[in-house]
Image: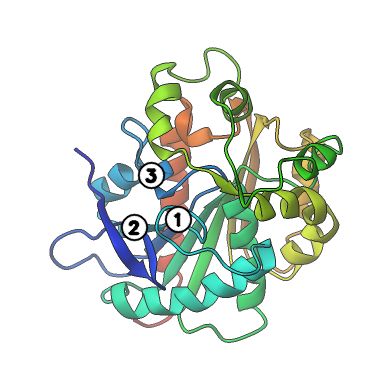
Amino acid sequence: MSNAQSTTSLFGEMSGRFHKPAGPLAPRTPLVVAFHGGTYTSAYFDVPGASLFDTAAANRIPLIAPDRPGYASSLSLPDMTIEAQAQHLLRALGDAWQRHGAGTSGIFIIGHSIGGAITAAIAALAAEEVPAFPLLGIALSGMCLNTPPEHKPLWEQLPDTPTVEMPPPVKDALMFGPEGSFDVKLVRDSDIANAPAPKAELVDVVSTWSDKAKDVLGRIKVPVHYRQAEVDRLWVMNQGEVDGFIGALTNSPLVDGAMVRGTGHCMDFHHVGRALQLQQLAFALQCASASGPV
């Protein structure tokens, strides 16, 4: 049974999932907030057999996974670009801290795919203004510097509708890596997290992220954990791209970055998923241990 509880009012008027261990937390425990990618809800982090919630609960780490704007019961924004979502979520995280931060040393954000780009933008904004919460660090996956140039016209030619739903065969091919790198059962089990994606955010990430990625990454001033799948068909992928991403984090005081060989875009759903989640949570604990007085 999942450790997560669903709610229609998590923070910032967003729906999502949360779990906080019973009883007092260990000193310098982070409050982890996880932002899902495009075409998934917060259930991305609670798929049976690949649940970040279960991994966090086993290590007595509180975890919140909101449905980003435009997903599940979370209202869409007038502007659904990466930057606009980051501005909205930066403010909402202040509400999360007030509601759920008691007993923790600060917020650590995990972001996957478009959720990772938004997380990076949140951290960049937090470096330029004083947020209403202590930001301990971030973990990014499922994102790099450049999307394949052929993707831009494909996304722009999508039907003129507010949301887009990927056909299962197309989504499976994009989200999963080489045969043998994942349990085939998880392909369909992960369908519980599927959702239509706001078209505006898909178009924005293929249209603007490549031009602004290095600027956004260069403004981040908190520790960054970064893992990127070698076989990620949503990004231009090679070692040089990953090295360029890591190298762009010029103002981060601590960067732990690497390419993960032989796996696909949604690493959480692959054999490497448990290792990824433990690494992300360990990094969150490391950042919390280095935080100031609590």
The residue tagged with tag 1: helix, strand or loop? strand
Label 3 sits on what residue type? Ala
Q: Which residue is mark 2?
A: 63
Q: Residues within 10 Å of mark 3 (few under 14, many from 20)?
A: many
Q: Which residue is mark 3?
A: 43
Looking at the rendering, in which quadrant would you find the C terminus? bottom left
59 or 10, nearer to the observer: 10
Q: Residue 142: x, y in percent?
A: 61, 42
Q: Please determine whether, in this image, residue 199 is positioned above or below residue 212.
A: above
Q: Which residue is mark 1?
A: 34
Confirm or deny contact between disc 2 and disc 1 (CB under 8 A): yes
Residue 214 left/right relative to 111: right
The residue tagged with tag 3: helix, strand or loop? helix
User: Can residue 27 be seen here?
Assistant: yes
Q: Residue furthest left?
A: 23
Tell me which residue sits at (23%, 41%) in the image: 2
Label 1 sits on what residue type? Ala
**How many angstroms separate mark 2 from mark 3 (CA)?**
13 Å
